[in-house]
Amino acid sequence: RDINLQLAEQLELMKPFGYGNPKPVFMCRNLHIQNSRKVGNGDKHLKLNLKSCENNIDAIGFNFGFYKEDLDMASIMDVAFYLEVNRWRGFIGPQLNIRDLKVPFFQDELLFDVENNYYKHLCSNLNKKENKIIPENKSMDKSNVIILKNKSIRKKMEYIKSLFRPERKVVVVINTPYKAWQLLTYFKNENDIINNAEVFYNVDSIPKNHSDNIIMIDPFTVFNNEDFDDIVFYDTPFSINCLKKQLTCIPSTSKIHIIFERADLRYNYLVCQQILPSINELKIVYQTLGKQTSGNFICSLNISEFENYLTEQSGVDINHSGLINVFNIFQELEIIKFNIKDGFLNISEYKKHDSKLRLEFSDTYMQLYLLKKNIVKFYNQFFTLQVKLFKNVGGETNELKTKNQSY
């Protein structure tokens, strides 16, 4: 709220800036991205409209155009900036001149717990389920599909709440930790719902004859039994193939509720950013580990302490699962051999490698890379796919009469 035109004009009075009078740099966290576009010669620059609380503000990032793809898949960002006055064709207003930016996750105790459980199961779930083949000639019963369109987040959560009735059994399928946290936070004070619902991170862990409603936080969940009256898809799956597989395997006795939107894929993309290490992160982890072991690499490493060390010494804020994936990649490239026990990573073998990593030979890297690529593909094809899959499907009250149409 303090970032406004009055402050920007007051800062102008401090000019000229330079040696001995540096221009002040401000930072804001968790700004919501309203829209973004590339501008300038060669699309080198980035123009954004951001929102904090009730205030909207424009921002410009010179030579930040290459961030456009990442920001298209994000909903919030942290930004360091100069505060300036923008004067353009009679308009005068405050503008953020971006010096640095980062796409973060919100953090609180519940989200921390959800993230820990989510990432612990994610890679194993991916290995087991993502590559399953869609049965041939399998079709979705469109007469049982309800699509909720253009609703606010609160309206969607109220809709889910309305489904949790004593006479019906409901499962809500959620693909990302932030969207799960969002729904669980809403339900926190709804004792009637919380007392009759249970959270799972793997569909295989649900006991037989389970009587409660379920919130399933597993991106690769496939329900093919007839235990549930309502199956709600709260946010978007990680790929087109995954969506088709989920929809075609649902029995005709279950009603399908589609309430996700294209914008939800931003959170899927953020998950990939967390677990897919960048080339720079691979290099930094390798170099840091080499320094800590005097080039020997054979060691027993406290993983949590190493994470903190990376952040403090190299500025690398890497997710725990992302760090484990770094070591998995190194092992698949036959650089090291390791095991994990009691929070320690034990490296038993090391082989010096060429300066260039051949990442195409790492199953972990390629699997995560393709997962990220499929999210972008889904995002780009979302509206075309929506028409193809859900043509003539009704809204909240109207349902399609035609059945058994294949994809």
Image: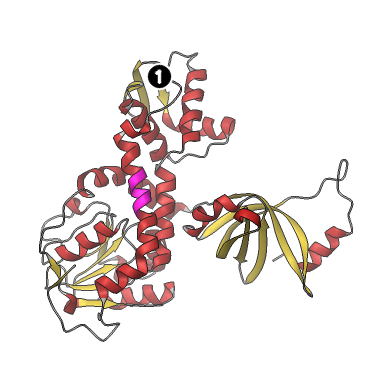
- What residue is rendered at 34% in x and 62% in y? 236
Measuring from the top left, give residue 370's x and y in whole percent: 33, 46
Q: Is residue 45 left or right of residue 393?
A: right
- Which one is nearer the viewer's eye here, 216 or 146? 146
Q: Which residues are magenta?
A: 369-374
Q: Residue at x 25, y 57 (%)?
A: 241
Q: Which residue is mark 1?
A: 353
Question: Regarding mark 1 in the picture, which secondary structure is present there?
Answer: loop
Identified at 32% across, 75% down, the residue is 161
Kind of residue at disc 1: His
Residue at horizontal 40 percent and vertical 42 percent from the top: 276
From the image, give the main secondary structure of the stretch colored magenta.
Answer: helix
Quarter holding the N terminus is bottom right
Residue 202, position in %: x, y? 23, 51
Q: Is residue 183 above or below residue 342?
A: below
Residue 62 x %, y %: 67, 52
Q: Which sits in the foreground, 135 or 338?
A: 135
Classify residue 209 as left or right of residue 393.
left
Q: Is residue 303 found inside the magenta-colored segment of the image? A: no
Residue farthest to the front, as pictured = 42
Quadrant (top left/top right/bottom left/bottom right) for the C terminus: bottom left
* Residue 4 visible in the current orientation: no
